[in-house]
Amino acid sequence: MKISERVVLKFPRELVDKPTISNLVKKYDIEFNILQAQVLPQKEGLMVIVFTGEENVVKHVLKELKNQNIILQRLKQDITKDDKICTHCGVCIGLCPTNAFYYDGSTRKVLFDYEKCITCMLCVKGCMVRAIKIKF
Amino acid sequence: MKTIEEINEKIRKGQAVIVTAEEMLEVVKKKGEVKAAKEVDVVTTGTFGPMCSSSIYLNFGHPAPRIKIGGGTCFLNGVPAYAGLAAVDVYLGATAIPPDDPKNLYYPGEFSYGGGYVIEELVSGRSILLEATSYGTDCYPRKELRSYFSLKNINEAILFNPRNCYQNYNVAVNSSDRMLYTYMGILKPNFGNANFCSAGVLSPLLRDPEYYSIGIGTKIFLGGGIGYVAWHGTQHNPSVERTSEGVPKRPAGTLAVIGDLKQMNGEFLRGASFVGYGVTLIVGIGIPIPVVDEKVAFWCGIPAEKMFAPVVDYSKSYPERKPDILGEASYAELFSGSIKVGERTIPTGALSSFVMARKIAGILKNWISSRSFELTNPVAKLPGKESGVKMKGFETKEKIQ
Ligand code: SF4
Ligand code: SF4
């Protein structure tokens, strides 16, 4: 079964300059999408990333990352938008750092792409009618 | 030239041509304003945004024995209502919050309940808890009243908004290095986002920039029901800088509106909270513009590219009431998703829902074409750009002069 797993990775200083992720992707049949990255040379790096692939492969990749001294945290909290409450104003669009919200072209309704969310919570606070909720 | 009476006659006969402001843009673009004015009779507009100067006044009817809430205290679902009127008349504003709300003690505060929410719940038919106290008189002996009520079992409920429908508004940005929590929403540091609040080409007063059609007495869509323009709104400021077409480039005209809450609808009156700022009410308004001549068609044909809003720094200029702006952004840019300010490209967010504005303009169009809504001649004009009416600042004085 194909799955997507969103994780926060903390790289130790000595690994920041190494192509850890691309090596893994070359080795395994897996896709990845970096949602946010803060990687400065010779400093600790931080990355929010989604891996998509067969369940056992994704699990294996996560294990390998752990073995390389990378601190790994799953993003457990899920953000949901309640469309019965949402007024489609679009305040969340300007707030979201990863463009998880966007206007649907012709209807101009505000849509939410869960896959891009890094659960920073900014939109939860910013929505005037509290249409955005956190699920644990 | 057409008169409003002639347009109404056409509406009654089912012959009137009614289009939304969005559709009218296309008509004018294709056919020009002369032809558009001949073919189209009514343009409907709409807007749906947070409007803090919104309120209701209620008359509960008299309980037995009677109570004089006037001069006493009154809470609706724990939110204080103004009780300085007669025995059972009270007034509730959208921004009122319960006295035990922690406000910004733990900054930024949540402001999870207040007047705007009470208004939404009331109009949606839900029960509201009334708690009132008084001192007791010979004619009004009761000293306490605690009762649930809903909209249908009280005598009167009127929505009265001293300032709604701003004609154009600021685009809010934040030049500082910390997050700001404002009535224009959360503003990210270092120009992280730019929030604006207008329905743009659908916005009522932007389609009637010189208050040619809309005036005191104009019948409107208000909160899902019918309302009227009662006066010009507070802070009405018609003398600001305008484009060559006459469209204000700064926040300008405003409207005071009134209507019977009992025929309104919770979909178009929504309680809302800004974290760190407070509670408000999102109000839906739609105003029909009779296309009496080419001038009206001309204004309704001005595209978003030719309408501009000022970009204001809410970390400094706004709180300190400095007049400086960082630039201007066209509504075409604002609706595109980002604006350019100097060298920076800033993502935009809208506080006003275009989806709902469009819905309101559509509903109003249906009301008129199904003959359940006719147009009115205003009984008096709103102060225009030549009136000399200007918004004043408040100069503080420490001593009596
Ligand atoms: S800020 Fe809230 S109401 Fe506005 S579009 Fe986003 S989710 Fe919907
Ligand atoms: S929590 Fe909201 S603002 Fe943050 S990434 Fe997710 S969708 Fe975007």
Image: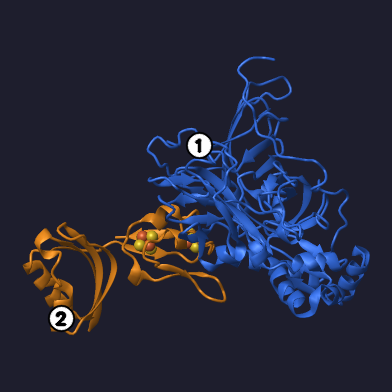
Chain colours: A orange, B blue
Residue at point 51% right, 74% down? A104
Q: Amino acid at mark 2?
A: Val
Q: Which mark is residue A57?
A: 2
Mark 2 within 8 Å of ligand 2, using the beta carbon: no
Name the outermost residue toward the front. Answer: B343
Which residue in the structure is indicated by mark 1?
Answer: B98
Disc 1: which chain? B
Q: Nearer the viewer, residue B327 or B79?
A: B327
Disc 2: which chain? A
Q: Nearer the viewer, residue B69 or A36?
A: A36
| Ligand 2 located in image quadrant | bottom left
Mark 1 within 8 Å of ligand 1, using the beta carbon: no
Is B375 left or right of B132, judged from the image as shown? right
Residue at point 13% right, 69% down? A18
- Whether residue B125 can be seen here: no
Q: Judge whether A55 appears above or below A114 on screen.
A: below
Task: Bin the neighbour count of mark 1 within 10 Å (Cα to Cα): few under 14, some 14-19, many 20 and up.
Answer: some
Query: What percent of the width, then of the height, locates residue B73?
Result: 60, 28
Q: Judge whether B398 appears above or below B369 on screen.
A: above
Secondary structure of the residue carrying numbered label 1: loop
Secondary structure of the residue carrying numbered label 2: helix
